[in-house]
Image (tube, rainbow, N blue to C red):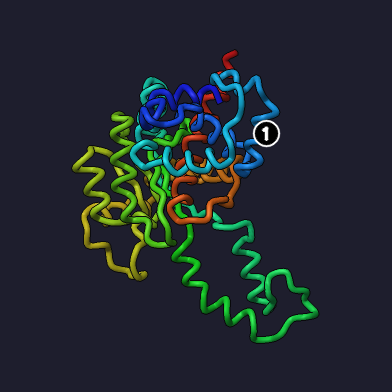
Amino acid sequence: MRRAYELGQRVWPDYASRFSRHDFTRPQLFACLVVRESLRLSYRKAEAFLDDVPDWLAEIGLDRPPDHNTLWRAFGSLLKKHRVGRALDLLAEDERATLARDLSATKPLTIDSTCYEPRHRSRHYDRVCRKMDLRPGQKYGARKPGKYGTAVNVSRSKKLRRMPKLGLAVAAASHRILAAKSSTGNGSDAPDFEPLLFHAWRRAPRVKAVVADAGYDSEANHTIARLDMGVRSVMPAKIGRPTAKAPEGRYRRLMKQRFARKADKSLYGQRAQSETVNSMMKRNLGECLRSVGTARRKQEMLLRCLAHNLMLGRGKTEGRD
């Protein structure tokens, strides 16, 4: 909470306006939101929890917890895209020496994406209900054939278009998130490659190699990485229909040849580190989003990225102590 407050002081001014009530500063509200997210609490439970830990509040200069309505409003106003980007800039700047050591030729930048559940009922549960022709919560013996399964199949594509999606650029050696892009819809990953790589490269100029799965495969992405930023890109050339012909693009053809003889096996194996970060975030912060609106779901995913980096810094500090 203290680290989040210190970061908030560098990102947000204390008050949005000189006419505001000045009950709480914006860095204080950001620290409370990080605690709420790390403990997987609702706004009301976060208010009750903070009321029980006055010593935590004293660390950031509070004598009482913010109201749950105040936290709800602060969530929407604080977590704007440019503010989250500024926070990632500052976190990367604080760890510049560590990142310069971690991002080597053998420990590359890894890019991957994952989808979050928009509610606590999982897709696997929906799939089983559809297979058994049951409504959610309905017992097996009371099913009515042809009712639920047909309705779910019709609306399944609509649900996929509203699926929350988070793309991450991660330092493989330290599991730190250098760039994040939140979106909606289970679409192609390829358009997300350029913004993720650019912002990671901007925050850590010593990036030498980037590794991504076949979802990011594109000749344009290879060209952006290798020619525009001087970063070696490794992605299997598997996009498109299976064929015996070599890919037309220069870099995709090179990838096809190198993967055939397993020349990049050890380097490409580091791609699993981005999947590790996705697993860490879902285990520590939850795989279901609590927000309802599309914009707030995007903000919640970005807040989880900041919370993840702050938790990594906390663990290293405690280890030294």
Of residues 321 and 276, the one drawn nearer to the viewer in this rendering? 321
Residue 73, horizontal then vertical, whole percent = 48, 42
Residue 82, horizontal then vertical, whole percent = 33, 39
Residue 294, placed above or below residue 156 = above
Few, some or many C-alpha atoms within 10 Å of disc 1 (few <14, some 14-19, many ≥20)?
some
Residue 189, placed above or below residue 23 = below
Residue name at image x 37 percent, y 60 percent: 188
Of residues 129 and 298, the one drawn nearer to the viewer in this rendering? 298
Residue name at image x 50 percent, y 55 percent: 115
Residue 23 visible to the viewer: yes
Q: Which residue is mark 1?
A: 49
Residue name at image x 19 percent, y 42 percent: 228
Residue 119, placed above or below residue 25 = below
Residue type beneath disc 1: Phe
Residue 267 visible to the viewer: no
Quadrant that contains the C terminus: top right
Q: Outermost residue toward the left? A: 227
Residue 173, horizontal then vertical, whole percent = 46, 32
Q: Which type of secondary structure does the marked residue at label 1 adopt?
A: helix
